[in-house]
Amino acid sequence: MITDTTRYRIRSGAPADIEELAEINAAVHLQAMTGGNPHPGIGAWTRDLFDGHPTVSPADFLVAEEVATGRPVASLVALAQEWRHGEVRLPVVQVELVGTHPAHRGQRLTDRLFAALHERGDRDGVVLHVIEGIPFFYRRFDYEYALSNGAPLVVPAGALPARRPEAALRARPATPADADQLAAVDRALAVQGGLHCPRDAGRWRYELAGRRPDDFVRREVTALTTADDVVVGYAAHAPRPNAAGELAVFAAACARREDWPAAAPVLLAQLAEVGRETGQAADRPFTGLRPLFDAEHPLSRFAGPGVPRRPYAWYVRTGDPVALLDRWRPALAERWRAAGLRWPHESLRIDTYGRAMQLDFRDGELVAVVPGPRSTAPVDDPAVHAAIPLGALLQLVLGYRTLPEVLHAWPDCALRDRTTELFLEAAFPRVAQMVWSAL
Ligand SMILES: CC(C)(COP(=O)(O)OP(=O)(O)OC[C@H]1O[C@@H](n2cnc3c(N)ncnc32)[C@H](O)[C@@H]1OP(=O)(O)O)[C@@H](O)C(=O)NCCC(=O)NCCS
C-alpha cells in the first residue's frame, strides 16, 4: 500500500473537534447494530469524553487531520486509569473509538495514530496499553491477547431466582448519594486478589449521574445494602437487555468476600427483575444474564453452571516490561514469601528477545527490577535464567496464562533450570480478571 504521508498530520484533539468526531465515530462504529445508520450512543459517548468527563479531556484524543481542509478524518482516544492488584498499581491506557472516515481509509492513519499514542504513553510512564476489538488487527501494533474479556457463560433467565429472597441484605438502584460508600467498596476490593479498576467518589458520581442518558457506556448500578441501608456492594449492568435478550453485567462487588453467599442470590434476583422489566419496556424478551467478568468471579460461581461461552480477550501492549515488572514487585515478593521460596542467587535474569531485565535479590528476597544486559541468543546464554517472548511475559504477569500453559504454547519460552521454573511458576498464578474499566 502506497500512502501519502504529507496529506495528513497527527495532532492532539481540541475542543472544537467535538461535533465532527462525534459524527464520524457514530457513523463508523457498531454499524452492524444500527444497520448502517449513525449510532447515537457512540455519538453521545464521544461528546461525554470531550465535555464534562472527570478524567478525560479533548487532548486525550489523537486526531488525523487532512492538511488541505484542516478537518479531522480519523481518531482514537486514550483513556487513562489505574488498575489494582493488591498493592500493585498499574497506570493503564485503554484505547477506544479507533475509527477512520471511509473516504480516508487505505492511508494507514491508524498506524500513525498508534505510533503517536505509544510515543506519548511511553513518555508518560504508562506501563500497559489495552484495547478490545477487531480479531488479529492490533497484533500489527505489538499487542498480544493477555486478559480475558467477555462472558465465559450466560445464565439463562429460567435459572435465576424468580423473586428476591428474604435476606439480611437488600438491593436497590444506587444514587449519587451512595458515591462515598461505593468508593469504599472499591477500596476494599484491593485485597480480594483479582485485578480491579477502583473508582473514587467523584468517579462514582460520574457513573451514576454524569453521563448523557444515551451514552453507549452508561451503566445502571444496583446497590447492595444492609437492612439499615449501608452500602456493602454493588452490581453494574446495562440499562436493558441487548438484541439477544441478554442483560450484560459489567461488575459486581462485595466489600467483604464472606458476604458473597448471602449477596449473590439477592443481586441475581434483582438483576433478573431489572432484565425482565427493562426487557418488557423495550419490547424484547429477557433471556439471561451475561456477566462480562471472569469465571472465577464469585457472582459467576454462585450463578450456577450457566451456558458456557468461549470468552474473548483484551489485547495488551507494554512499551516498558522492566517498569511493568517493577510495578508488579509487591505481588511477586509476597507470592515467593507465601511459597517459602528464596532465590539462591543475587539476581534472576529474564530476556524477552529484545528487552532484558534483572530481578535483584537480597537474602533471597526481591528488592529491585532493573534493565539487564541484552543477550543476542538468550537461550544459549548461561547468564540468562529465562527467555520469555514479550507477549508470553504479558500473559504471565497479568495472570492470564500460567507458566505450564505458556511453556506449552510458546516453544521459544525457555527456562535455564528447575529452580527457575519453580520460582516463575510461583510468581505467576492465574489472576481473576475483574476489571470494569473506567471509560
Ligand atoms: C479499522 C480502521 C480504523 C482502519 O482504518 P485505516 O487506518 O484507514 O486502515 P487502512 O485502510 O489504511 O488499512 C491498513 C491495514 O489494516 C487492514 N484493515 C483495515 N481495516 C481492517 C479491519 N476492519 N479488519 C482487519 N484489517 C483491517 C487493511 O487491510 C490494511 O492492511 P494491509 O497493511 O495488509 O494492507 C477502519 O477500517 C475503521 O474505521 N473501521 C470501522 C471502525 C472500527 O472497526 N474500528 C476499530 C474498533 S476496535
Image: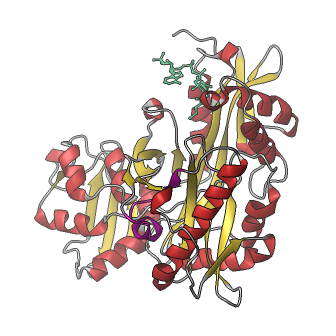
- Ligand 1: quadrant of the figure: top right
Q: Is residue 435 left or right of residue 212?
A: left
Front-lying residue, 273 or 90: 273
Against 269, residue 383 (above or below) is: above
Residue 103 appears in view = yes
Task: State left or right for residue 223 relative to residue 195.
Answer: right
- Colouring scheme applied when the structure was drawn: secondary structure
Residue 430 sits in which quadrant? bottom left
On screen, residue 233 above or below 124: below
Residue 342 percent coordinates (x, y): 23, 78
Q: Is residue 16 above or below residue 1?
A: below
Q: Residue at x 73, y 78 (%)?
A: 180
Residue bounds of the magenta highlight: 287-304
Expressed as whole percent of the image width and height from the top left, the position of residue 255 reads 56, 81
- In the picture as drawn, the residue positioned furthest to the right comes out as 16
Check if residue 302 falls in the magenta segment.
Answer: yes
Query: What is the number of callouts on the image?
Result: 0
Residue visible at 72% across and 26% down in the picture: 27
Which sits in the foreground, 136 or 386? Answer: 136
Residue 126 is inside the magenta segment: no
Q: Position of residue 213 (x, y in %)?
A: 80, 50
Q: Residue furthest left?
A: 418
In the picture, measured across the screen, residue 392 lies left or right of residue 2, that is left
> Measuring 70% from the left and 80% from the top, which residue is drawn there?
181
Instruction: Specify whether residue 378 is in view.
Output: no
- Judged left or right of residue 432, residue 246 is right
Give coordinates of residue 164: x percent, y percent.
58, 75
**Residue drawn 49% across the image and 63% down it:** 434
Task: Specify the farthest residue to the top.
Answer: 2
